Amino acid sequence: MDLSTLETPCLILDKGKLKNNIDRLHKRMTKLGVNLRPHGKSAKNMDVMTMALEGQSGGITVSTLKEAEYYFSHGITDIVYAVGIAPVKMKRIVGLINKGAEITVLLDSIEQVTFVAEAGRKNGVDIPALIELDCDGHRSGVTLEDSLLLDIGRLLTNEKGVSLAGVLTHAGESYQCKSTDEIKAMAETERAMAVKCAEILRQDGLPCPIVSVGSTPTANFAEDLTGVTEVRAGVFMFYDLVMAGLGVCDESDVALSVLTSVIGHQKRKGWAITDAGWMALSRDRGTSGQRVDQGYGLVCDAEGAPMKDLIVSGTNQEHGIISARQQTELPLEALEIGSMVRILPNHACATGAMYDRYYVTDGSTAIVDVWHRVNGW
């Protein structure tokens, strides 16, 4: 099979770039002396995660229970479900534990401790929990100054049916940084806050075996991870235009792309129309606040080489609009109707979620494998 034989739109994964990206972060973590707990939310596929786990301790992170069940069915038992737990999820959590999964939940409130402990007691299991920390005001979590940290820690330790596994934080604001120096500073903020919270728990006589930090930007620029037991990252496997805009990678490192067909021209507007709209690319506009706005994605030829100055400037549900960034004349001879181009995504996770499989290439347009993805919650 070759890319030219595929029905578009479809998702293309460059295996060589994937391996290079994974190897790069593995070497960083080895140098810093910390285990990588890869996040399965980007990959949603066991072939990718097998590569990401090579040389690591074996544990992974997930963002959905569908991912947890999928990876567990493929032999992974050590799983952190890194989204705040809700009561309606407890039946599936208990089900996984009863089958042999070592699944750890995430929480940041007394209310969550209460219903998790109740589910554990009712089903005769012990459910380990990480306390979520807010290191940057980005999202959920307990702050360093909040007495809730110790209140939750003590309750997790004293209640039956639940136990304190440690602390976890995510420097999501690293995605808004304007320079690599800012990312380095954010990485140190993330580390220092998590380590300090662990110290507070331990000084109170509470266990804190896990100190978990991570985001792809901070994982790539952290200079010191003293006191951290593991780093979580996910999109590093594929990278995307947001990561390139942050200086975390180059555009040439992006391993994921959407293959799409040119289906029309609007010459008076300087447009080429494709069959990949926002249903195929996602609505993510993560580069809009960066120095270079990549629209809905960067246009490459069928071999994956960027086409000078071309982006997907607009989308409808099933239509993409290609135009020149600087309003220069569109090279219609390279965008003939029926020809194929590839679009590098703003956000690999969001774009990948549109598809049920990867068509895997390895440096050419030949398809060397097909890897299926798990989607849903």
Image (cartoon, rainbow, N blue to C red):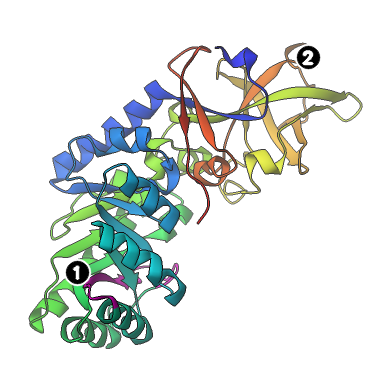
Q: Can I make out residue 181 in this image?
A: no
Q: Which three-letter amino acid code belongs to the residue tagged 1?
A: Ala
**Which numbered circle lies on residue 364?**
none
Residue at x 19% of width, y 74% of height: 164
**Residue that sits furthest to the right in the current view:** 268
Q: Which residues are magenta?
A: 123-140
Residue at x 33% of width, y 26% of height: 20
State the image coordinates of residue 149 (x, y, percent, origin top left): 26, 82
Give neighbour class at mark 1: few <14, some 14-19, many 20+ (Cα, 10 Å): many
Which of label 1 and label 2 is nearer to you?
1
Q: Which residue is mark 2?
A: 336
What is the quadrant of the N terminus in the image? top right
Q: Which three-letter amino acid code belongs to the residue tagged 2?
A: Glu
State the image coordinates of residue 276 (x, y, percent, origin top left): 71, 34
339 sits to left or right of 109? right
Say if 209 sits above or below 110 in the image: above
State the image coordinates of residue 106 (x, y, percent, origin top left): 33, 69
Say if 293 sits above or below 228 in the image: above
Q: Which residue is mark 1?
A: 165
Q: Nearer the viewer, residue 183 or 148?
A: 148
Sequence-first tag of 1 and 2: 1
Among the 4 quarters of the image, the one containing residue 214? bottom left
Residue at x 30% of width, y 59% of height: 80
* Secondary-structure class at tag 2: loop
Q: Is residue 372 magenta?
A: no
* Secondary-structure class at tag 1: strand
Q: Nearer the viewer, residue 176 or 88?
A: 88
Alpha-carbon distance for marks 1 and 2? 57 Å
Residue at x 37% of width, y 86% of height: 111
Give neighbour class at mark 2: few <14, some 14-19, many 20+ (Cα, 10 Å): some
